[in-house]
Image: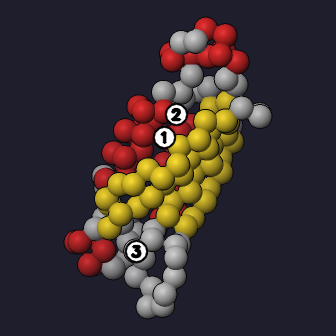
Amino acid sequence: MSDRITLSGLKVRGHHGVFDFERRDGQDFVVDVVLELDLAPAAATDDVTDTVHYGELAGRLAEVIAGEPVNLIETLADRLVTVCLADGRVAAATVTVHKPQAPIPHEFADVAVTVRRTR
């Protein structure tokens, strides 16, 4: 599939992590999503109902990120990719979860997990 919708840099506060202080205090998570689907129907009709509404998708993803805490960003990424694949038009989805404030005792720029799922 060569058509894609990309949502980059969705920043939402969540309470995920293995440490008590991560769950108590929370931190910002940044999510990037790439959906692979046929965009020809939407291009032909010029109708948002013929594509994935990225604003609505962002809202559903934000609910998951801000919702029930998990220990691992791997688990969070899996939950988010499931949200992306809930729309039957999506053939594949790639989700990257960034945890830029991860509790690492060394200087670092980012920690991220990427998952890709297909139908």
Task: Using residue 2 as the reference point, say whether residue 81 is left or right of it.
Answer: left
Mark 3–mark 1 Cα distance, whole angstroms, equals: 24 Å
Q: How many numbered markers are drawn?
A: 3
Indicate which disc residue 86 carries: 2
Secondary structure beneath dot 2 equals loop
Mark 2–mark 1 Cα distance, whole angstroms, equals: 5 Å
Kind of residue sitting beneath label 2: Ala
Q: Is residue 112 above or below residue 43?
A: below
Which residue sits at x=48%, y=90%?
A: 106
Which residue sits at x=65%, y=51%?
A: 116
The residue that mark 3 highlights is 101
Q: Earlier in the sequence, mark 3 or mark 1?
A: 1
Q: Earlier in the sequence, mark 3 or mark 2?
A: 2
Indicate which disc residue 18 carries: none
Q: Is residue 42 above or below residue 10?
A: above
Residue 55 location (% of width, % of height)? 42, 33
Look at the numbered discs 2 and 1 and tell me whether their residues touch, using CB distance below 8 Å. Answer: yes
Q: Quadrant of residue 5?
A: top right
